[in-house]
Amino acid sequence: MSTSPPSGAYHHGDLHRALLEAAARLLIANGAAALTLREVARAAGVSHNAPYRHFASRQALLAELATEGFDRLRRRLDDVAPLTEERVRALGRAYLRFAVEERPYFLLMFGGEIEKSAFPALANAALTAYAILEGAVEAEGGRDPGEALRAWALVHGLAHLVVERQIPPEAAFAALG
């Protein structure tokens, strides 16, 4: 009786997931600029060609990591109590906490290295997260379509100042009230 895996199976079981987990560890440790498919393969313990079976390019890998980042952000925003007065501010504080606590993902998601339109899942994840803010602005009486964008721009600017270590997080949280 053979104990070897079936033909075509990876010893990792789920190589795609193993590669993403290795990439996430590298992203957190070194940032997106240092992330290569070869380094991801090495970190996952597979051949340097193995990632190409799951990611057409480095950009595709980064896009999938950024998609996961937007999903994480969306979950945090979803956790903000619905229909509370001041929900927009609470969403802003959740966004800022995400930026502080998930800095490598935040920088990847908004760093401009990935063209979202080239990766539909990433574009959709970004829009889904933003739609939470739009809904909160509407629920609080916002009628101007630019109101949600202005709110996001304010919080996003504060978040970038914090992650780029230009202001302390306490100053940004204080600015949000």
Image (cartoon, rainbow, N blue to C red):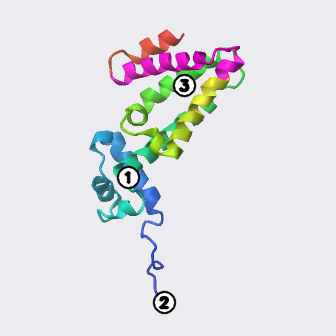
Q: Going from the N terminus, do you reach mark 2 or mark 1 first?
A: 2
Instruction: Using the image, tell me which numbered label, if any, was put on residue 22.
Output: 1
By secondary structure, the bulk of the magenta-drawn segment is best described as: helix
Q: Residue at x 53, y 34 (%)?
A: 73
Where's residue 74, x and y in %?
57, 35
User: Alpha carbon of mark 2 to alpha carbon of mark 1: how far?
Assistant: 33 Å
Instruction: Answer whether residue 122 is visible to the viewer in this image.
Output: yes
User: Alpha carbon of mark 1 to alpha carbon of mark 3: how far?
Assistant: 27 Å
User: Image quadrant of residue 30?
Assistant: top left
Q: Going from the N terminus, do you reach mark 1 or mark 3 first?
A: 1
Q: Residue furthest front?
A: 117
Where's residue 113, x and y in %?
35, 37
Residue 110 included in the magenta stretch of the image: no
Mark 3, other Cα within 10 Å: few <14 / some 14–19 / many ≥20 = many
The answer to whether the residue labelled 2 contacts the one labelled 1, judged by CB atoms less than 8 Å apart, is: no
- Residues drawn in magenta: 136-164
User: Image quadrant of residue 16?
Assistant: bottom left
Where's residue 76, x and y in %?
57, 32
Q: What residue is shown with label 2?
A: 1
Mark 1, other Cα within 10 Å: few <14 / some 14–19 / many ≥20 = some
Tag 2: amino acid: Met
Q: What residue is shown with label 3?
A: 94
The answer to whether the residue labelled 2 contacts the one labelled 3, judged by CB atoms less than 8 Å apart, is: no
User: Image quadrant of residue 139?
Assistant: top right
Tag 3: amino acid: Ala
